[in-house]
Amino acid sequence: MDFDDRQWRAGEKLETAAPGPEALYGLQKTFALEERPIPLLYEIPGTLSRELGNSVFGEHESAVIGPHEHRRLLFEGDTLFNGYFQYHISGGVGAEITFTYFEKFTKGRDEVRRDDYQNGEIGDHGQKDTIIADGSDLLYEPFWYRTMRFLQVEIHTNEEALVFHRPRYLAPGYPLEPGSYIRSGAPWVEPVYAMCVRTLQACMTDAYMDCPFWEQMQYPMDTRLQALFTYACSQDTALARKALSDFHDSMLPMGLIQGHAPANPKQVISTFSLHYIFMLLEYYKRTGDAGLLKQYRSDVDAILEYYDRHMGAQGLVENLGYWDFVDWQESWHDTQGRPGAAACGPSTILNLMYGKALLDGAEIYENTGRPGTAEEYRERQKHITDRIQALCWDEDRNMYREGPSYPEFTQHAQSWAVLNGMISGREAAELLRRTFEEPDVLQCGFSTCFELFRACERAGCYELTYSRMEQWIRLLEEHCTTCPETPVDSRSECHGWSALPIYELLHVIAGVRRETGHPETVVVWPHMEGLLSDLEGEIATEYGRIGFCYTYADGQIHGEISLPGGMNGTWIGTDGNSRELKPGKNVI
């Protein structure tokens, strides 16, 4: 009430929000108002109470920093989080105060645990705000939220003492209600799941974000995975629908969507347009919303036509332009995550990603009444896979090379080959097994494990993924509270695409899936063999909660599945046989 705003410039009227006579001529408002498609964000108040090292505050709510004094305060949050920080400062005219927000303590290549403040350092991964006190009773709040797990405050006073009050904040976020849960006698299940849910929540505001600390961008590849994790742990589909709208609105004349949207400046990541197609079909499979597919199916055709225009002399797409990112694979460091083969000709990975997008595009067109286009896409996909088989299969290694004459082998290429139906059954399982065992095969990072896991599941060798799940379990030992961008030496400590165990635990290991295009239908096919002996939990749905409780012994799963009213389903056992599930308790 006592703020002096007399020096503020008066607002100017630009235009009325309500449409006027110009609407009769099709003229649109510059600043159009639309109904908000997602719920309002929350803001939860909090206080930083945990100090590391020598305590400055102790049990008090403020601390006095004397004249010509230098104090360093170090705070730790309960977990990594976003906050609009509020700093109450009194007196101390001319004092310099620096706030450094950071996600972890670091040393070398993950040589210390994330919270090891005694042996680690901030390094170059901190973000700083600096203010100069004017001697008044000041409340300072940065314009934008800051992300932290740790906060360092350095205070240099001059002639006058300064009173620094305990930091407070408002934590903003999207009101996700993660109603699903999972429990097991295995001690890692609950903490890994909780770590992943925290990761997802920290990457959700008015849009999905790759990471809250750095870019804060909504990338199609990241967002597609985050949407799948959201479907698993909650009923929410609104933020995914908004993201699809954002990507649709970013379509460029040459036929690709932008690499992040909404954003400025323009960026094009050619492979991310394929992830947009994957996300469209996955949204339909979760919601059954054929109307949205009809609205956006022309985007699918534009993207696939862009790829088709880049067909080279060998009958494979190449020279796609822009940034054809696949994974932060260390061997591709110099090409910024781009497969090395793409620099000198066709890439097996890129072609098989395109092939899978053609298959998904066919499903999209088939589900919206365009079977002719669907058939065309399937023929184009077969052409791609036939050329890959003829040019890239290596008889000596029994594996697909990463290009017709490029002697590199990757888990990525073999996974996409399985997902394209080029190899199946025992042969597919043996192919994937070799990718885990042969040391020169490039491994999938957190961002591309989804396709690797889906390929193993499809080939009937899902147990291969258990060794990879150890990477997430080790994060607990490293005292992570959220999932980093990459398994080791990560820049970002909270990256939405890394929350994959949400999907695996609920949809594959517990086996409860709603991906048929009919939300009332569930397929339950657990994969506990060799990993867990017991599992229980619930899956949140708009019909109510699906409950499950299993024990696994001697090759058999025993337990029960409870479906809410209005739902039906199918149980698939370890022997592959199926039975009908009805509302209420179903004993297995």
Image (spheres, rainbow, N blue to C red):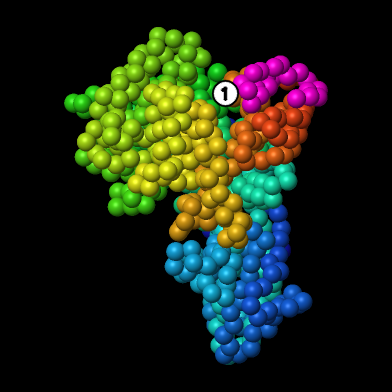
> In the rendered image, which quarter contains the N terminus?
bottom right
Residue drawn at 62 percent across, 35 percent down: 529
Taking the view exactly as shown, the residue that stands out farthest to the left is 313
Judging depth in this view, the residue of 8 and 230 nearest the camera is 230
The residue indicated by pointer 1 is 285
Which is more toward the observer, 279 or 68? 279
Q: At x 66% / y 24%, what residue is drawn?
A: 573
Q: Is residue 365 above or below residue 17?
A: above
Percent x, y of residue 394:
28, 32
Please tell me whether residue 366 belongs to the stretch shown in magenta. no
Q: Position of residue 293 (x, y in %)?
A: 51, 21
> Magenta span has 587?
yes
- Name the quadrant containing residue 136: bottom right
Which quadrant holds residue 232? top right
Which residue shows up at 52% across the image and 53% down it? 484
Q: Secondary structure at mark 1?
A: helix
Query: Which image quarter holds the C terminus?
Result: top right
State whether residue 91 is above or below residue 432.
Answer: below
Of residue 425 and residue 142, the one placed in the foreground of this image is 425
Amino acid at dot 1: Lys
Relative to 467, residue 271 above or below: above
Q: Is residue 585 visible?
A: yes
Number of marks:
1
**Quarter residue 542 falls in:** top right
Q: Pinpoint residue 25: horizontal percent, then vertical percent.
A: 45, 22
Q: Estimate the x, y position of residue 392 in percent, counting from the top left.
A: 27, 30
The majority secondary structure of the magenta stretch comes to strand
Residue at the spot 29% in from the left edge and 52% down from the top edge: 334
Taking the image as drawn, is residue 5 in sight? no
How packed mark 1 is, by other alpha carbons closer than 10 Å (few <14, some 14-19, many 20 or more), is some
In the rendered image, the residue lying farthest to the front is: 554
Q: Which residues are magenta?
A: 569-588
